[in-house]
Amino acid sequence: MPVPGCLCLGRPREHEVQTLDYRHSSLDFIPTDVFTHERTLEELMVDANQIKELPRELFYCHGIRKLTVSDNEITLLPPALGTLANLEHLDFSKNGVIDIPENIKGCKYLRVVEASVNPLGKLTEGFTQLLNLTELFLNDTFLDFLPGSFGRLSKLRILELRENHLKTLPRSFTRLTQIERLDIGNNEFTELPDVIGGLTNLMELWCDTNQIKAIPSVVGNLKQLMFLDASKNRLEFIAEQISECHTLADLHLSDNLLQHLPESLGRLSNLTSLKVDDNRLTCLPFSLGGLVSLSELNVGGNDLEDLPPSIGLLRHLRTLYADENFLNEIPCELGSCSGLTVLSLRGNNLMYVPDELGRIPRLRVLNLSDNKIRSLPFSLTKLKQLQALWLAENQTKPLIKLQSDEDPDTGKRVLTCYLLPQQPAEDKDADLYSDTDSFHPSLWEEERMQRKQIHFEFADLPDDPQDPQVRRFIYL
């Protein structure tokens, strides 16, 4: 006979039930039926209920390997927790637990602990004796510091400490040589701790949303690093040694105070994504062309006046965002970026764009809005895959000439021009559509297909492209 209100996995006979799943069951307490399986129960999941405490009988189930009580109203983990000697996975995240009992050191086989979103404030010394831990999640737990003995957890592979009040890491951290993912984002670090340089197997490092001012030379020790997010800091300096992170694929440095990037950056031949938007960059290193694997480049929101010609070597580049800079021109070499699909140059000082842009066969989106564009190169008509061309706010004259007139209603003297008055939106709709208008449904598909692609309309031209009468620009 199955236990009411739960999913029993394992063997069909009641006395051999191994897994009980009571998640999202609107429970105020753990059902007493659970304890009838204390000899065989290995997994108990009671997440997302309104349970306030863990009963004493639960800790008679000595065979439990996985216990998840996430998203409840528990404020206390009883000392008896340490009697669950076979426990391997413990999840008490999203509760109100204020303390982890010292006796948790009795759970010697614990491999995974998920304790995020609890007002813990600190970790006990007993916790650092869980020597088999491989994954530890302590996000948003009000931590001000880690115990000096934290380095005992030398088998950790994943450690998340996001959204706490940490300012430093203990020296013993250097013993965590097996860590592959470390998240210390959204804390109170003013510098990247030197101990991170000893984490030689680190593959992911999240240190965003702190007050870090520099990426030091120790970063060069992280030979296995593939992902680095240092955005939303106070970075002014990136050490040249970052080029020694040969496997780095994603580098996020957005929203900092960087005025330049190290010339050695171009040695990162495996880099696929580089985000340095919202900084104070005045130029990009010429070595940028060495990033031969780069597919995404975001340099928007800086003080750039030009882009290096070496950008043309980025044959795998798919998206380039250079919005809101002070670009006066675009290098013609950009036309060699044959893989480019999105090019956004919004909010610059461009008056022209080079003919070579028409050589980018896969270009689908071209944003030139909010510039000073006077004309477009005729070569853009060759962009057969272009689906969006943005040209708004490219007025070449700063002000339309106004004329003096008299308002016939008020008699007051006013200024007007040929653009005024503009027709109200509701009147436009009235002119375009009426109750008697008809539009056969079959025409909608035709209209949709036409809008899939940019169509250039221009007068008939001579066949000879060398003919001086051929107009090479479409004027706006």
Image (cartoon, rainbow, N blue to C red):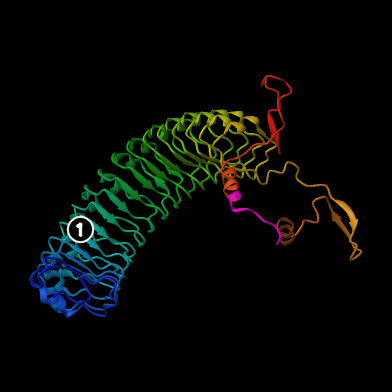
Q: Is residue 326 above or below residue 149?
A: above
Please tell me in which quadrant of the rendered image residue 59 appears.
bottom left
- The residue that label 1 is drawn on is 149
Residue 440 colored in magenta in the image: yes
Which one is in front, 45 or 290? Answer: 45
Find the magenta span and give its range.
434-443
Report the label total.
1
Q: Position of residue 156 (x, y in %)?
A: 21, 53
Q: Is residue 142 left or right of residue 329?
A: left
Q: Is residue 314 left or right of residue 192?
A: right
Task: Check disc 1 and report its element: helix, strand or loop.
Answer: helix
Q: Is residue 331 visible?
A: no
Does residue 65 appear in this view? yes
Give yes or no for residue 234 being in the magenta stretch: no
Q: Nearer the viewer, residue 391 or 14?
A: 14
At which x and y percent is residue 115? 27, 65
Q: Residues within 10 Å of mark 1 (few under 14, many from 20)?
A: some
Question: Quadrant of the image for the C terminus?
Answer: top right
Q: State the residue in front, 148 or 315.
A: 315
Determine whether 71 is above or below 260 in the image: below
Left or right of 380: which side holds 111? left
243 is higher (above) or lower (below) than 189: above
SS majority, magenta? loop
Say which amino acid is labelled 1.
Ser
Residue 275, percent across and down?
45, 44
Establish if 342 lies above or below 118: above
In the rendered image, residue 179, in percent from the top left (x then y), is placed at 24, 49
Identify the residue at image location x=67%, y=46%: 393
On-image quarter of the N terminus: bottom left
